[in-house]
Amino acid sequence: PSAAIQVAPQAPIQNETTVDVAVSVVLSEAMKPGVLPLLQFAPPAGGPIAIPLLGDAMNWNGTLRLDNSNGTGTGVVIDVKAVLKRAEVEGQGLRYWAL
């Protein structure tokens, strides 16, 4: 199983003011009923930020809110967990975003 992550706007993301980043996650297999995928982002400064996702089965969407307190440099998706019908997918460093 795999997960494809897309963001808008594309990197580099200017976070001099507050910016909402649209996050789309498409899974290669459907989720188990009642289970939500978990996505976290580690900005250059500060702790990990959970990205709440809404959707169903294989298509999920969320919003990552960034501001200047998140620093400048490279951030990374640090945790992608999706409990699928047959397996658990965990990814580390799947997507890097420059702030």
Image (spheres, helix red, strand yellow):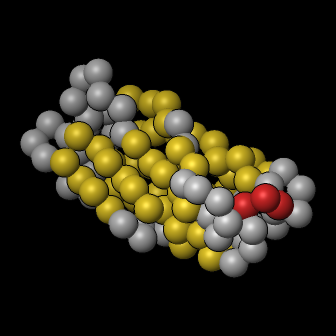
Q: Is residue 70 above or below residue 36?
A: below
Q: Which picture quadrant has residue 15? A: bottom right
**Residue 11 in sight from this viewpoint:** no
Q: Decide: is 15 above or below 52.
A: below
Measuring from the top left, give residue 13's x and y in whole percent: 75, 67
The residue nearer to you, when weighing 10 against 82, is 82
Direction from residue 3 to residue 99 in the image, left or right: right
Q: Residue at x 75, y 68 (%)?
A: 71
Left or right, 54 with reference to 73: left
Q: Position of residue 60 (x, y in %)?
A: 46, 39
Q: Residue furthest bottom?
A: 73
**Front position in the image: 10 or 17:** 17
Residue 76 x %, y %? 52, 68
- Exactly how many numbered labels are in the figure? 0
Quadrant of the frame with the N terminus: bottom left
Residue situated furthest front in the rendering: 46
**Residue beneath the point at 23% across and 40% down:** 83
